[in-house]
Amino acid sequence: MARIAEPRPAAEPSSAVQQQRRDAILQATAALAAEKPADQVQMNEVARAAGVALGTLYRYFPSKTHLFVGLMADRVDRMQDGIHRRKAPAGTAADRVFDVLSRATRPMLRQPHLTAAMLNSLNTADATAVAEVGHIDRQVRGMLLTICGVDDPGPQDISPMRLVQHTWHGILQSSLNGRISADETEDEIQLACRLILAPLSEAAS
C-alpha cells in the first residue's frame, strides 16, 4: 500500500519540457505498477525508467501517494476525453452511468496491481495535501452528471452521484481482493446505479 502523502505541495509543470518529464514519470509508473504491487515499486526505479533525476521526480510527486493519485488523475482526464468523443449512451440516468463505469472498470481489472495502487492511494490520501484528490472527485462526478444531462446540479443531484462514486470504489476493491468475480463486479455496479440513481432516472423520464 502506498504511504500517506507528506504535507508539502507538488510542483506544477511550467513549460512543455517539464510537462514531458512529468508525463514520462507517469508512463514509467504505469508500466512498473502493472507488473508488481505498489510496495515493490521504488521511487528511484521510477525515476530511472522515466529518464529523470530523482529530485525531479520528488519535485512533481513528493511521495508515492502523490505519484499514484497523479496517475489516476491522468487516467480520469483521458476517460473524460473519451466520453466527449463518444455518442452519449441511451437509457435512464442509471443506464448511462453504468455504461461509463463499466467501460472504465474492465481495463482496470485487467491491471489489478496498477488499479490497486491507484485506488489505495486515492483512499488514503489527504485531500488537503494532494490536490489531485479533489480534481478526481470533481471530474468523475461532473462526467457522470453531464452524461445524465444534468447541467446545473444541485445537492439533490450531487449527493447521489457522490454515493455512486464511493460505492464503485468499494466494489472495485472487493473485486481486486478476490471477493467477487468480474461478472459479479459488473452486476453489482449496475445494481448500485439503479438503486442509488432511481430518483434521478425517474425525474429525467
Image (cartoon, rainbow, N blue to C red):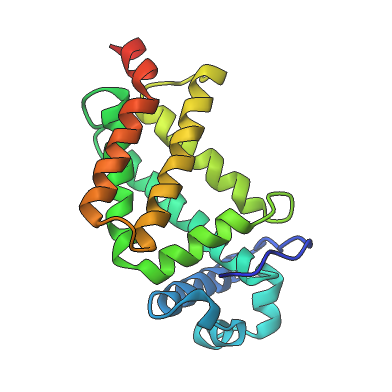
Residue 27 percent coordinates (x, y) = 45, 72
Residue 87 percent coordinates (x, y) = 24, 35
Residue 194 vs 200, above or below: the answer is below
Give the quadrant of residue 54. Answer: bottom right
Q: Residue furthest right?
A: 8
In the picture, measured across the screen, residue 68 lies left or right of residue 111, that is: right
User: The N terminus appears in which quarter of the rendering?
Assistant: bottom right
**Residue at position x 44%, y 48% from top?**
170
Residue 46 percent coordinates (x, y) = 54, 82
Q: Nearer the viewer, residue 46 or 182?
A: 182
Q: Nearer the viewer, residue 123 or 17?
A: 123
User: The C terminus appears in which quarter of the rendering?
Assistant: top left
| Residue 185 visible to an observer of this rendering | yes
Residue 136 vs 32, above or below: the answer is above
Give the quadrant of residue 199. Answer: top left
Q: Nearer the viewer, residue 108 or 149?
A: 108
| Residue 142 visible to an observer of this rendering | no
**Residue at position x 34%, y 26% from top?**
195
**Residue at position x 50%, y 70% from top?**
26
Residue 11 percent coordinates (x, y) = 71, 63
